Image (cartoon, grey):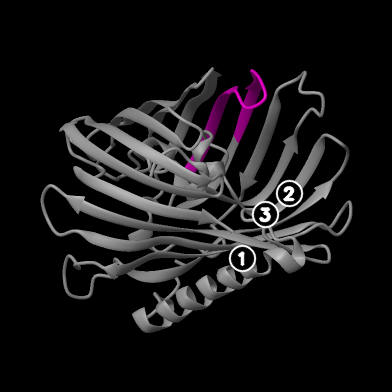
Amino acid sequence: MNRRRPLRYRDASRVAVLSCVLCLIGRGARADADYELGHGIDVGPINFAGYSDLVANVPSRGTGSLVLNDLSLFVSGHIGQLFNPFTEVELADLGLIHARAAPGDDHGTGDLVLERLYNDSYLSDSITLRLGKMLAPVGEWNVIHAAPLVLTTVRPAVTYRNFSEYATGISVLYSDPSARFPDFQVYWQPSGEFSERPSHLTVHQYRGVAGVHVSFPLGLLDKLGFSFQHSKDVLGVDQSLLGTDYHYSVGQLTLQGEGTYSDISDNGVIHNHDTEWAAYAAASYTVAEQWSVYAWYEGFLDRTAPSTAQDVLLGIAYKYEPALVAKLEYLQNIGGQPVNRTGLYASFSVLF
């Protein structure tokens, strides 16, 4: 199993400070280099960008925490038709104020994670060939994933927990420039994930992955999508997943959600269920130019859980500008074995 060694707290802190300094330098260059927050810095054909997400949690039970949840750096190149590399490296789960669950627990120590490393070749105006490690297009949230761009601080379990979030291999993407036909992406990972996430940052680790996502445009940003993914994890358990996602706006009201249903083989591994399902439905309303309120409900039946987890979340967001967002949320578990802890969450995220 390819696991990386967790950063020591001192080393991770230095990385965090250095990255924040680079971000501030970039902001300071606004006047001289026409820097715009959220668009990164261009050096010739190379663009440097990223995002950070600082999250505070005060649970109803247990100890509160302040965590640098993500600090990501994007490096992308637009070289030509065949060579357009993209890399995302992330410092994940660095506890600034955090109580460890037990001695030796790695949670909160910070890990450097390779999120993406691939090259895009533009075969035509509508077809792209992608080679490398990429985010698996199961639903919408996993592909967007950057904290300032998604709805809430707390991520619904259905958007990451019950499928392979990554694929290392080959993918073909089709996007109709005139938006008359649906977009689609097919992908295949023949063996293990490159630079695999450590086990304490993920629920399942996968070996073989293959899938497709089809998205029907309903407007400028609105869409209806369908997913299929077949995977095999490190324990030899096969999973076939069907999913759907939607995003639809009516005036100041936006509706979005995702749902999945999976058939799971036991393959010698004992589960409480041989199927797994999950869904969340969310609504957000723009109260003023910079203020919005939102809510979501999620039901999640994990293969190992005795009953369905049910969560309700209410929140408010302030967008200082599109790339700079503060959120305050309360999540309540109303049944089953919780995935996210009941309590108060606050976050400050920036796309730089």
Among numbered discs 1 and 3, the one appearing first in the sequence: 1
- Residue furthest left in the image: 61
Magenta span contains residue 36 = no
Q: Secondary structure at mark 3?
A: loop
Identify the residue shown where x is 29% and y is 45%.
269
**Res. 234 visible in picture:** no
Place of residue 126 in the rendered image (x, y in percent of width and height, measured from the top left): 82, 34
- In space, the residues marked 1 and 2 are separated at their CA atoms by 32 Å
Q: Amino acid at mark 2?
A: Arg
* Most foreground residue, 103 or 263: 103
Q: Secondary structure at mark 2?
A: strand
Task: Name the residue at 79% across, 56% down.
Answer: 84
In the foreground, 13 or 272: 13
The numbered mark at residue 319 is: none
Residue 39, label in figure = 3
Dot 2 corresponds to which residue?
130
180 in relation to 150, above or below: above
Seen in the image, is 51 located left or right of residue 57? right
